[in-house]
Image (cartoon, rainbow, N blue to C red):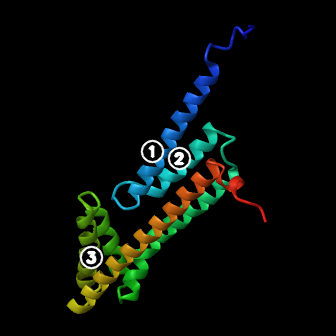
Amino acid sequence: MHRNFLQPRGFASCLVGVDYLVWSLTASLLLIGLIGCIVPLLPGTTFILIGAVLHKLLLPDSMGWSVVAWVSALWFLSIVADFIGVMIGAKLFGGGKWGMTGATGGAFVGMFFSLPALLLGTFLGAVVAEKYGAKRTDRESLKAGVGATVGFFISTAARLFCAVAMIALIIAAATDWFSAMPTP
């Protein structure tokens, strides 16, 4: 039995081990990303994008660059939805620039504590900014705060939708699910 001297014994099993390691890394990043779409301080869809790029770079034959491009497009959509959600919510409920700025500031402060603090920070930030910055009435300020909070929920739902779509696309491409589908 002739064996290449430079090839270590058990080389093929080593490659399988690397596959498992890469899949474990990818799965961890996808899971952290999914959790990060809900939990503050974790850039959810960014972790998913990093997982897709690393998977492609470490296992090049597992999926094409077009999948990474689609995942990147969904990542960009999630970022846009995140920024626009609170702004649209505050604007639809009568808030102005002060309310949007206050909601953003309140969300930023609240995210360091917990999910309820994040929601409360978004609400109170919009209310305080509208009340004292824009000199609005109590009723108008509260309405803007409710709008900012509704916008936060909308942007969270949009981020979660993008994250699930990104993960489904990565798994479908990397497991060769598309080739298993019957052709018409």
Compare marks 3 and 1 and give the one earlier in the sequence.
1
> Which quadrant of the figure contains the C terminus?
bottom right
- Give the numbered dot on residue 45: none
Q: Nearer the viewer, residue 40 or 129?
A: 40
- The crowding category of the residue bearing disc 2, from other C-alpha atoms within 10 Å (few below 14, some 14 to 19, many at least 20), is many
Q: Secondary structure at mark 2?
A: helix
- Give the numbered dot on residue 123: 3
Q: Nearer the viewer, residue 181 or 124?
A: 181
| Residue type at the position of mark 3 | Phe
Q: Measured from the top left, where is residue 85 in percent x and y?
A: 43, 75
Q: Is residue 137 visible?
A: no
Name the residue carrying label 1.
28
Name the residue carrying label 2.
51
Q: Residue at x 70, y 8 (%)?
A: 5
Q: Is residue 149 visible?
A: yes
Instruction: Name the image quarter holding residue 129.
Output: bottom left
Residues under labels 2 and 1: Cα distance? 8 Å
Tell me if label 2 and label 1 are in contact, CB under 8 Å: yes
Q: Measured from the top left, where is residue 28 in percent x and y?
A: 45, 44
Q: Residue at x 57, y 42 (%)?
A: 54
